[in-house]
Image (tube, grey):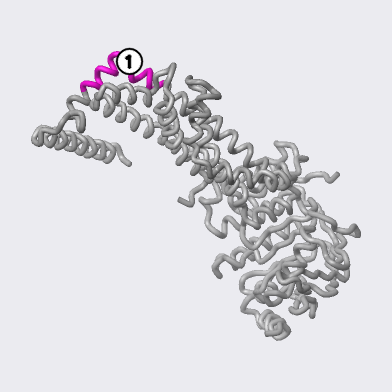
Amino acid sequence: MSIKAAANFVFIKVIQVVAAVIVWELTVTALDVDPRIVPAPDAVASMLWAQLISGAIIQAGWITLQETVIGFVIGATLGIVLAVLLSEIDILRKILQPYIVALQAVPKVAVTPLFLIWFGFGMESKIALVVTILFFPVLVNTMAGLASTSEDQIELMRAYGATRWQMLTRLKVYVAMPYVFAAFEVSLVLALTAAVVAELLGSGTLVGLGTLIKIYDARMNSAGMWAVLIVLSLLGVMLHGTVMHASKWLIRWDRKA
Amino acid sequence: MTTLNTLDKPVSKTAAINVSAISKTFKSRNGEDVVALADTDFKLNPGEFVSIVGPSGCGKSTVMRIIAGLIEPTKGAVFLNGAVIDGPSESVGIAFQRPVLLPWLTVARNIALPAELAGKMPKNKIEERVNSLLEMIKLPGSGSRYPSELSGGMQQRVSIARALMAEPAVLLMDEPFGALDALTREHMHDELLAIWSQNRSTVVFITHDITEAVYLSDRVLVMAAKPGRVIADININLPRPRRADLRGDPEFARMSAAIRELIPH
């Protein structure tokens, strides 16, 4: 995209957002909507501004971001490591597979109260839910990825005397990469959701974005909740963009797309 | 331990192959025995270029994979310079039907793969060898490109360079040009012969294209199916170096027709 085309694109997007806000403001004013149901954009903006000035929303965002990212790193690592072990060791897969399927079927959110009992009301219980929600999609996708080698590739590696370790590190890891990143793409947004849900269900010592929503909810401050939602969606877009860029760079050899 | 030579000082690293009464029986899905190969017996002299032609299902790929050490014969054995082949060996290079380049490796690292897997060649030697192979396949300076940036013909050349990386005494080729268009294929024939004239390894070339087999080979083995076996062994006494105009030669046409006659429909 040339600079001119990029500028054009940004300009059109800005126009769209401004137009949407104007329509929103006019509708709310014209129909005299109760601000507890749908707040006017200027109310939301001033809430957002106030929260930014005081730093409260940034602190809350930082807490939620940490829960999401730490949980993501732990969950993804566990999922990938277990996927490699299960793919390489047949007997382990045969023993564990039924339990994994059973655990996968449990609605993870339902376990949150247990996590609160086990890990307390701090960040740990939120991270635990993020890890649990992330773990399965990463595990399942990585296993599918590791198994996606073609017969040609296996034969090639065998013909040149590849050891089992080389087969894993020089072939399977690479063919699995697009699968793993596809899982990341889906599950990072899921991770953010999990962090917020965990805060909604059991906020305590630390105030994250989910906790902030609860606080505004208790005060019937809709504009405040909308302001937090805007920050949450920005956070989601940012995380998604980061993973997309990392994935594009790491699997830049994959030109099928 | 073999010594490594760059292409600048070609040596006659080559091998005799003795395929001694091999049979191969597979189990089909419903448990029946399928005889892919029955008492197949032939010898290849060092440095000889031999093609194997035959209809599909005649077991020509099975023969190749047994020589490669990828599968074991049910009966009989294959000897390489008198030693039984019991697994993939560094003295055998393979080029497959499809190039099978690893898309995440550069062209240079794809070519270097056999040496990197074996882990015996020092890094600077690998680089030197890869560069001379790139020259040989007429892709100098393409080492840092990725396979997806290359045409089908270029990719197949890279896969041949990879097969030659460890300076194998034997080069096995399983319909390596099957997927290429006719013009590229004829061009590749001359490339292959030029490469072979430099390194003179023993070549086993599997194909179902009779003119291809005649153009390239010293000898053509004809196989038949059910059960797979060698039914004819024909010397191709056409002078070398061979050039494209040979394809219009009456003797060339006569030989191709004679082999065509031998292949059951």
Magenta segment's dominant SS is: helix
Camera-nearest residue between A54 and B98: A54
Tell me: residue A257, above or below residue A103: below
Question: Looking at the image, which residue is at 79% across and 65% down?
Answer: B48
Residue type beneath disc 1: Gly
**Quarter assignment of residue A25:** top left
Q: Chain of mark 1?
A: A
Residue A95 position in % (x across, y down): 70, 45
Say if the magenta span includes residue A51: yes
Task: Identify the residue position indicated by label 1 in the image.
Answer: A55
Question: Looking at the image, which residue is at 85% across and 72% down?
Answer: B41
Residue A210 position in % (x across, y down): 37, 26
Camera-nearest residue between B202 and A74: A74
Residue A156 position in % (x across, y down): 69, 54
Tell me: residue B88, above or below residue B42: above
Q: Residue furthest left?
A: A30
Q: Which residues are magenta?
A: A46-62
Judging from the image, what secondary structure is the residue with disc 1 in?
loop
- Whether residue A139 sits left or right of residue A159 in the image: it is left
**Quarter assignment of residue A82:** top right
- Whether residue B229 sits left or right of residue A190 in the image: it is right
Q: Which class describes the residues within 10 Å of circle 1: few (<14), some (14-19), or many (20+)?
A: few
> Is residue A147 something that shows in the picture?
yes
Camera-nearest residue between A187 and B123: A187
**Quarter assignment of residue B225:** bottom right
Tell me: residue A241, above or below residue B168: above
Question: Looking at the image, which residue is at 75% across and 59% down?
Answer: B171
- Whether residue A107 sits left or right of residue A164 in the image: it is left
Q: Residue furthest top?
A: A54
Say if the magenta span includes residue B28: no
